Amino acid sequence: MATFGVAITIPQPWAQRLSAARHTVGDPMARAIPPHVTLLPPTEVTDTEVPAFTSHLEDVAARHPNFSMILAGTASFRPVSPVVFVQVSEGISSCEQLERAVRSGPVERRLDFNYHPHVTIAHHVGDHALDLAAHLCADFRAEFAVGGFDLYTQGIDQVWRPQRHFTLSGEATGARP
């Protein structure tokens, strides 16, 4: 059984800055987890379930359109969880719709916390390091088009590696001014 995750991978050059901040504060997962917005948290999938799972992800991508994302500033889940993150300030609704769709079908599961799209920059570090992460990325801003999402697997070395990209190809609904 393999552990999978689904995420919107943050593109360069912004991913490099976010990774550097995570590394600077001593986050033990800085090299193992690329900067991303989670759509499906770590989930075990049996070998026999993988074809249905990837078919499900193909269907989700085909039904959802591209969208714009803006990441700006930092926030924290403290005191509930020792996490500092860069906030999604545009694209929240699209992330929520994708997350609900991805987390259905063959991988339907309950979450420990309500879904909140974000990019983690510090986790499992002390308060001083969390404060430093918040400071390092307080002025962070990135704007980019989200054209798809990625399926990741976690190796025995705990590193998350992309396995497949799914291109968003659904029709946008509603008129934009």
Image: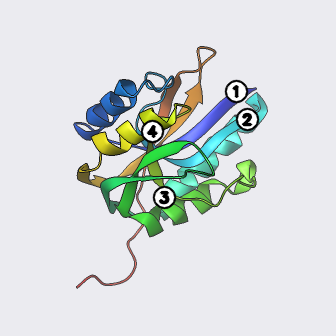
What separation in Å lies between label 1 and label 2 (alpha carbons)?
6 Å
Q: Residues within 10 Å of mark 3 (few under 14, many from 20)?
A: some
What separation in Å lies between label 4 and label 1 (alpha carbons)?
31 Å
* Residue 11 found in image quarter: top left
- Tell me what residue is drawn at x 53 percent, y 64 percent: 96
- Tell me what residue is drawn at x 25 percent, y 48 percent: 140
Instruction: Identify residue for label 2.
Output: 45
Pick whichever, 97 or 80, lies toward us. Answer: 80
**Residue 14 image offset from top left, x and y in percent:** 26, 40
- Tell me what residue is drawn at x 22 percent, y 85 percent: 177
**Callout 4: SS:** helix
As shown in the figure, which amino acid type bears the numbered disc 2? Val
Q: Of marks 3 and 4, which one's residue comes earlier in the chain?
A: 3
> Quadrant of the image for the N terminus?
top right
**Residue 156 image offset from top left, x and y in percent:** 64, 15
Instruction: Identify residue for label 4.
Output: 130
Instruction: Identify residue for label 1.
Output: 2
Q: Given contact means CB atoms under 8 Å apart, are the residues at marks 1 and 3 in contact?
A: no
Tell me if 32 is positioned left or right of 134 in this view.
right
What separation in Å lies between label 2 and label 4 (alpha carbons)?
32 Å
What separation in Å lies between label 2 and label 3 (alpha carbons)?
22 Å
Q: Given contact means CB atoms under 8 Å apart, are the residues at marks 4 and 1 in contact?
A: no
Q: Of marks 2 and 4, which one's residue comes earlier in the chain?
A: 2
What separation in Å lies between label 1 and label 3 (alpha carbons)?
25 Å
Q: Of marks 1 and 2, which one's residue comes earlier in the chain?
A: 1
**Residue 6 image offset from top left, x and y in percent:** 55, 43
**Callout 1: SS:** strand
As shown in the figure, which amino acid type bears the numbered disc 3? Ala
